[in-house]
Image (tube, grey):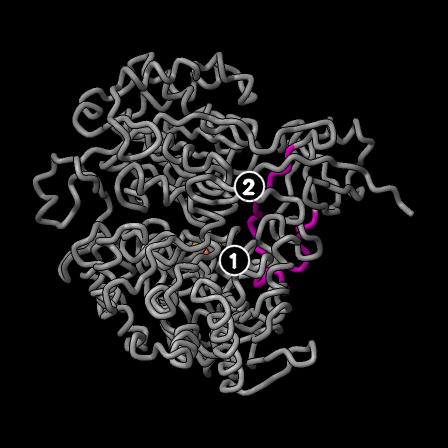
C-alpha cells in the first residue's frame, strides 16, 4: 500500500536514530513527509531497520511539542516565545548573579545537529564563561573518546564501513550490533555469506542475536573485559602472533598517562604475567581454552575489524578496556589498512561529529583541543574573537557530577536540550532531585518527557526534517539533513533557540553565525590544519554526495577511509591522509592497564549483577519510539534471568520481580532465559512504565567519568501477589 503513496519530490537525508547513520531518501507531498526509504547509493545500500523506516512516523506522533511554556503556580502554561525566552534568560542571569558563571550549565545530546552543539558550546564556554557543558554522549561513549585520544593522540575510529568487506575476523565486544546497529551488522552478514571462512568472535555476557552469528562466543562475567583483553595480549605475545616490526616502529608502551616514562615490550610482557589465561579465567567466568582460542583466531587473521560500544564503555574500567582493545590492534599491526580497524560504534546520530569533535564536553574545546591546555584555550579565544583569558581554565562538570551539583544547589540553572536525563541518568531518582531544585530550561521536540515535566521553561524544538543541519555517524561521515517541511505549531530549530537565548544573555555579537550554513562554515574553518580537518566538506558537496568522511582537507578531496597508514603510503600526503599517529613521537601508546577492583562488590544482600541494554525496536528512553503506534505491542518491561536462578527463587515467566540495588529498586516481569549467565539479570533501558535506572550504578570511570550502567550489584525477589 505504501508503494502507492504519491510523492511530489524526493530528498536525500539520514536516519535520526542510531550512530550507524543510514542514508535515506525522503518523499514529500503537500508539505508533509510521506515516505522514508533507504538510499540505494548510500553506504547502507538501501537498507533501513525498523526504526529507520519509522523516521516519518516520529514527525507526526501525537505528543509533538508545539508551544513554549512557563511554569506558573506550579503548572506549565502556554506563553509567547518572547515571554518564554525572557523567562529563561532571567533565570540564567539570576543564577549567574548569585553564583557566577559556574552556577549555570548546558546539558546537550548526540541528537542535535553539529551546528547546534557547536553553538551551545560557544555560547556557554566563550560567552557565559563556564565549562559546565556536557551531554548524554558522556553516558555512552566518553570512555571510547578518552581511549582514542590517549592512544592515538586524536579521537574517533581509524577505519570506515568499507573495512567490513576486507575483514577476515570480526571481534565484537560489548556490542549487540544485530539489534543496536542492525544495518551495519547486515553488512557483516553479507561478508559472512560471500566469504564463509570469515570468523566472528563475540564477547558478551548475554547470548544476544549478535552472538548467534559467532564462531566463538565468550560469555564473560560483566566488568572483566580488561582481564580478558590482557589475557589475549599475553597469549598473542607468548605464541609470537604479534607484528614485531610494527611494534618496533610505531608503538610505545606507557603506564598511567601519555607523558609517563616510556617502557619496553619486555616490561609489558612482564606486566602481563599476572594475566595468563589460566590466571584470569575464573575471574572472567570463562575457560582458559576459550581465551586462548580467541587470541589464536585473532593472531592468525589477515585483517581484524573490532566493533564495540556501551558494553565496553559503560564500566568503571571503561578507558582501560578501550585502551586494551586498541592495544590488541597495535600489537598485531591490525590498523591502517583495509579490514584492519579498531572501531567503536556510537549510539546516537551525532554523538561523534556533533559532540566529541566540536568539543561540547566539560573537558574539551573544538577539534581535539582541551580546556586544560593554555595554548588550546588561546587558539579558541582568537578564533571566536574573544579577549585572551575569556575561556575558563577549569574543566567543567561532567554529567553525573553536574546533576549532583544541581542537587547541592551549586549549579542553579541549566539548559537541557534533546535529551531526557530524568530517565536516562544512572541512579536517576537521586539526580531528579537536582532537576527539581534548579531553574530548568528544557528544549525538546516531544512533550511531555520525564525531564520536561520538571522544567521551569519549556521550549518546543523542530525535528530532523523540519530544520537543517549536519549529522556525523560512527565512520566519521558527515551528512546534510535538509529542511523539507515546517515544524508543528510554533516549534523552532534548536539553533534559532540558542541564538535567541544568547542574544538575551548579551552574547549576540559572539553568535554572529546564525544560519546552519554560516555556522557550518565557521566550524569548517576551525577544523583546518587539525587531525579533524574537514575544510573540504562544503555545503555544496554535502548536498550532492551521500556524505563525506573526514579528514577531508580540500574541496577536491574524496574523504578518508583509513587514518593512521603508518609512514608507508606515498599517496598519503597527496591525498591529505594522515600517515602517522597524531602524537608528538608519531607512535601510538599501548598502556599497561590493570583490571582493578570492582566498584560494587557482590554481597549477601546484593548477590547478583544487573546489566542493561537495548532491543531492536526501541531506542533510548523511548521518548520517540514509545509513541509510535506500530511499536505499542513491543515489550520493554521484562527482566531476563537465568532459568536456574529463577527456579531457585520459585519465579516463573511473567511473575512480578523486584530488582533492588543499594540505590533503589524497580519492578519488572520475570523472563527466564538462557540468554544470560547464572547470577546475571538483564533489563532494557527503554522501559517507560518502570524506572530501571533507579537501580543502576552511578559509579564512574575515573578518567572518562562515564557511568557504570553495565554492572550493578542487586538482589532479585519475587513480589508476592496481594
Ligand atoms: Fe537508523 Fe540505525 Fe536503523 Fe540505520 S541501523 S536505520 S541508522 S536506527
* 310 and 506: which is toward the camera: 506
**Above-or-below relation of 90 to 568:** below
The count of marks equals 2
Q: Residues within 10 Å of mark 1 (few under 14, many from 20)?
A: many
Q: Is ligand 1 less than 8 Å from the beta carbon at label 2?
A: no
The residue carrying mark 1 is 51
x, y percent for residue 97:
47, 72
Image: 378 above or below 30: above
Q: Position of residue 474 (x, y in %)?
A: 37, 50
Q: Is residue 625 magenta?
A: yes
Mark 1 within 8 Å of ligand 1, using the beta carbon: yes
Residue at mark 1 to residue at mark 2: CA–CA distance: 31 Å
Q: Main secondary structure of the magenta part?
A: loop
The magenta region covers 609-637
| Residue nearest the viewer, comparing 647 with 505 | 505
What residue is shown with label 2?
A: 699
Which residue is at 45% across, 37% downward? 318
Front position in the image: 103 or 568: 103
State the residue at coordinates (64%, 43%).
683
Question: Can residue 662 be seen in this snapshot?
Answer: yes
Identify the image quadrant of the N terminus: bottom right
User: Disc 2 on helix, strand or loop?
Assistant: loop
- List x then y, in percent, for residue 180: 50, 47
Residue 243 magenta-highlighted: no
Which sits earlier in the primary sequence, circle 1 or circle 2?
A: 1
Q: Give the side of residue 386 with respect to residue 226, left or right.
A: left
Amino acid at each position: 500500500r505504501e508503494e502507492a503513496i504519491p510523492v511530489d519530490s524526493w530528498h536525500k537525508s539520514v536516519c535520526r536514530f542510531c550512530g550507524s547513520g543510514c542514508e535515506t531518501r525522503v518523499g514529500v507531498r503537500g508539505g508533509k513527509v510521506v515516505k522514508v526509504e533507504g538510499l540505494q547509493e548510500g553506504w547502507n545500500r538501501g537498507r533501513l531497520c525498523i526504526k529507520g523506516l519509522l523516521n516519518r512516523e516520529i514527525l507526526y506522533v501525537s505528543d509533538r511539542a508545539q508551544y513554549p511554556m512557563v511554569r506558573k503556580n506550579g503548572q506549565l502554561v502556554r506563553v509567547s516565545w518572547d515571554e518564554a525566552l525572557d523567562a529563561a534568560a532571567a533565570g540564567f542571569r539570576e543564577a549567574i548573579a548569585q553564583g557566577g558563571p559556574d552556577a549555570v550549565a548546558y546539558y546537550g545530546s548526540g541528537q542535535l545537529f553539529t551546528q547546534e552543539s557547536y553553538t551551545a558550546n560557544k555560547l556557554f564556554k566563550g560567552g557565559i564563561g563556564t565549562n559546565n557543558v556536557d551531554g548524554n554522549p558522556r553516558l555512552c561513549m566518553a570512555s571510547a573518546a578518552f581511549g582514542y585520544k590517549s592512544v592515538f593522540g586524536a579521537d574517533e575510529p581509524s577505519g570506515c564501513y568499507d573495512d567490513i568487506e576486507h575483514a577476515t575476523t570480526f571481534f565484537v565486544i560489548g556490542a549487540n550490533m544485530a539489534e543496536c546497529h542492525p544495518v551495519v551488522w547486515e553488512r557483516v552478514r553479507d561478508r559472512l555469506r560471500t566469504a564463509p571462512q570469515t570468523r566472528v568472535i563475540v564477547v558478551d555476557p548475554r547470548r544476544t542475536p549478535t552472538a548467534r552469528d559467532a564462531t566463538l562466543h565468550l560469555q564473560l562475567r560483566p566488568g572483566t573485559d580488561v582481564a580478558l583483553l590482557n589475557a589475549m595480549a599475553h597469549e598473542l605475545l607468548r605464541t609470537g602472533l604479534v607484528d614485531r616490526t610494527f611494534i618496533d616502529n610505531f608503538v610505545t608502551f606507557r603506564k598511567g598517562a601519555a607523558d609517563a616514562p616510556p617502557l619496553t615490550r619486555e616490561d609489558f610482557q612482564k606486566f602481563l604475567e599476572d594475566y595468563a589465561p589460566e590466571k584470569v579465567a575464573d575471574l572472567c567466568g570463562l575457560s582458559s581454552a576459550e581465551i586462548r582460542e580467541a587470541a589464536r583466531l585473532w593472531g592468525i587473521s589477515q585483517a581484524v575489524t573490532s566493533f564495540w560500544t556501551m558494553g565496553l564503555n559503560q564500566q568503571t574500567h571503561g578507558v582501560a578496556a578501550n585502551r586494551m582493545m586498541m592495544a590488541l590492534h597495535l600489537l598485531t599491526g591490525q590498523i591502517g589498512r583495509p579490514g584492519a580497524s579498531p572501531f567503536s560504534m556510537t549510539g546516537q546520530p551525532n554523538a561523534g561529529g556533533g559532540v566529541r569533535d566540536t568539543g561540547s564536553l566539560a573537558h574539551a574545546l573544538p577539534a581535539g583541543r582541551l580546556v586544560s591546555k593554555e595554548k588550546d584555550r588561546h587558539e579558541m579565544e582568537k578564533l571566536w574573537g574573544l579577549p585572551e583569558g575569556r575561556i575558563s581554565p577549569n574543566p567543567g562538570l561532567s554529567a553525573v557530577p553536574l546533576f549532583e551539583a544541581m542537587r547541592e544547589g551549586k549549579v542553579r540553572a541549566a539548559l537541557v536540550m534533546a535529551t531526557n536525563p530524568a530517565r536516562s541518568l544512572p541512579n536517576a531518582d537521586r539526580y531528579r532531585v537536582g532537576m527539581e531544585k534548579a531553574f530548568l530550561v528544557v528544549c525538546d521536540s516531544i512533550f511531555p518527557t520525564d525531564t520536561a515535566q520538571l522544567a521551569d521553561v519549556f521550549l518546543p524544538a523542530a525535528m530532523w526534517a523540519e530544520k537543517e543541519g549536519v549529522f556525523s555517524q560512527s565512520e566519521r561521515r558527515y551528512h546534510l539533513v535538509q529542511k523539507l517541511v515546517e515544524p508543528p505549531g510554533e516549534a523552532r530549530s534548536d539553533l534559532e533557540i540558542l541564538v535567541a537565548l544568547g542574544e538575551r544573555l548579551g552574547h549576540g555579537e559572539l553568535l554572529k553565525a546564525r544560519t546552519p550554513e554560516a555556522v557550518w562554515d565557521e566550524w569548517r574553518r576551525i577544523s583546518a590544519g587539525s587531525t579533524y580537518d574537514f575544510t573540504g566538506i562544503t555545503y555544496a558537496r554535502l548536498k550532492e554526495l551521500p556524505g563525506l568522511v573526514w579528514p577531508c582537507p580540500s574541496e577536491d578531496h574524496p574523504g578518508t577511509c583509513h587514518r593512521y597508514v603508518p609512514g608507508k603510503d606515498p599517496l598519503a600526503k597527496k591525498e591529505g591522509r594522515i600517515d602517522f599517529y597524531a602524537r608528538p613521537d608519531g607512535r601510538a601508546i599501548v598502556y599497561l592497564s590493570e583490571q582493578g577492583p570492582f566498584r560494587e562488590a557482590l554481597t549477601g544482600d546484593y548477590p547478583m549483577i544487573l546489566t542493561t541494554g537495548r532491543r531492536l525496536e526501541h531506542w533510548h528512553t523511548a521518548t520517540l519510539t514509545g509513541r509510535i503506534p506500530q511499536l505499542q505491542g513491543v515489550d520493554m518491561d521484562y527482566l531476563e534471568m537465568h532459568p536456574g536462578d529463577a527456579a531457585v527463587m520459585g519465579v516463573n515467566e511473567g511473575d512480578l520481580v523486584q530488582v533492588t540495588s543499594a540505590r533503589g529498586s524497580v519492578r519488572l516481569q520475570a523472563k527466564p532465559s538462557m540468554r544470560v549467565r547464572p547470577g546475571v539479570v538483564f533489563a532494557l533501558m527503554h522501559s517507560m512504565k518502570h524506572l530501571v535506572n533507579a537501580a543502576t550504578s552511578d559509579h564512574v570511570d575515573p578518567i572518562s567519568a562515564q557511568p557504570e550502567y553495565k554492572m550493578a550489584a542487586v538482589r532479585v525477589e519475587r513480589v508476592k501477589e496481594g
